[in-house]
Image (cartoon, rainbow, N blue to C red):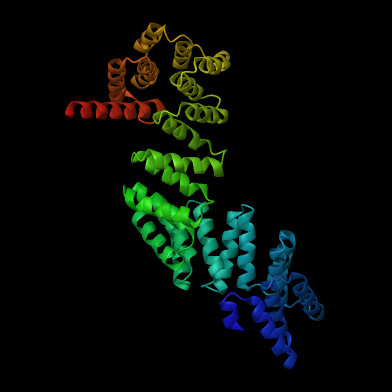
Amino acid sequence: MSALIALGDPAAALAQYERALAAEPGGRAPRLLHARLLMMAGRLEEAREELALLLGESPGEAEALFQLAVLEGLEGNGAGQAEALAKVVEVQPTHAEALAGLGDLALARGDDEEAGLLYGRALASDPDNLVALLGSAQAAFRRKDWEGAEAAAGRAAAAQPDYPFAYIDRARARRARGDAGGAIEDLGRAISLDPSYPWSYIDRGRLSLEKGRDAEALADFTMAVELAPELFAGWALRAALLEAAGREAEAVSDYERVVSLRPDYWYAWPPLGALYFLAGDWQKARSSFLEAARFDEEDFSLPLLAALAAHRGGQAGKAAAIVEEILPRMPRDGWEWEVARFLLRPAADMNLVARAQKERSKALRARMLFYLAEMSLAAGRKAMAMSIFADIDGAGAPAAIETRLAKRELARMSGAAQTQESQ
């Protein structure tokens, strides 16, 4: 029967147990085991009947009460679970599993102090109780006691070396403490114990990124999306890494997967719009920037980029409609106002140049001039556009989407010019 349980076949184990029980009826311990097996097999009503009989015969039996608490938890009855666990502790104040269970309930309702006390009582009774050790680590982490969290998770790993989540919890504490190397080591151990858990690869990939180990991060994110293609986080992280590496077509594919899984994950829409822009897919660029703008109505650069994409696609009317929709909401003293007016009347570019020259912030001036450079490129004035892109490359804020686009445009134009010269 134990072998069948270990193999993950509780129904077969239950059948084996019932045959043995019929041949030789047992006492209370076999009946408690029977109730546990019924729960493992998903036969919860029968388990409840068995426990009701046991508690009817002995209402204060701690183990029967504890199994009732387990059953209530399986059925999602938190109040019933708490009541049963409290009765266990009332009958047997040192019952480690019940104390740890109450600690979990306290942690779930946000009472970290109470949870810590309950876990402490459980560990005083059973120093190797895995639930209490992992709960203590989580409670300490929430208190930002990184060293305490690491110590508790380390004790859990020592108590049960083959349990991967002990290493995952210790990795989280080590990362918070600044020990990225130790965290990577722990996640590697967790992966060796359970290679099918995708979040270990995602977390290790993030740490590898922090240490500048892009190739290792890419391998981990790729494994995560292969294991769990429904998790958008793996796709989003890999997309950003591919984008930074200049692998634009692959990045587009990953970002498209992200927004198909989570259309409300607005962080993916601006870089996707930028990649469509660079690829000359003006309609998709416009749509992506407008989608991003739905989630942040205060960032007027997003609809401005959408209008610019419409211009680049030869749709001046759609560009004007986008600008006219946002113009009444825009502050007139901001740089976006002058860009909006320019996109409405591109021939009046001197107004934008004059406003840019007055701008004290080099980063904001670079963002304004990006629109002038793009419209110059659309008009066939490549030398002027390239000159502006070069100025932006040295002055723009790296995080601004206009700056990132300008850098890519400059690199592409410079590469094309060098190819022509070599020919």
Answer whether residue 178 is visible to the viewer in this image.
Answer: no
From the viewer's side, name the closer residue of 89 and 285.
285
From the viewer's side, name the closer residue of 148 and 203.
203
From the viewer's side, name the closer residue of 127 and 242.
242
Give the image location of residue 340, x and y in percent. 48, 14
Answer whether residue 353 is visible to the viewer in this image.
Answer: yes
Give the image location of residue 84, x and y in percent. 73, 67
Q: Is residue 291 above or below residue 334?
A: below
Give the image location of residue 144, x and y in percent. 48, 51
Q: Is residue 173 above or below residue 57?
A: above
Q: Is residue 298 above or below residue 328?
A: below
Q: Is residue 359 above or below residue 269?
A: above
Q: Residue furthest front?
A: 423
> Residue 395 lies in what quarter of the image?
top left
Quarter of the figure with the C terminus: top left
Q: At x 57% / y 74%, what residue is drawn?
A: 125
Q: Residue furthest bottom?
A: 24
Q: Is residue 88 left or right of residue 311?
A: right
From the viewer's side, name the closer residue of 226 and 93.
226
> Residue 247 lies in what quarter of the image?
top left
Give the image location of residue 189, x and y in percent. 40, 65
Q: At x 82% / y 78%, what residue is drawn?
A: 56
Total labels drawn: 0
Quarter of the figure with the N terminus: bottom right
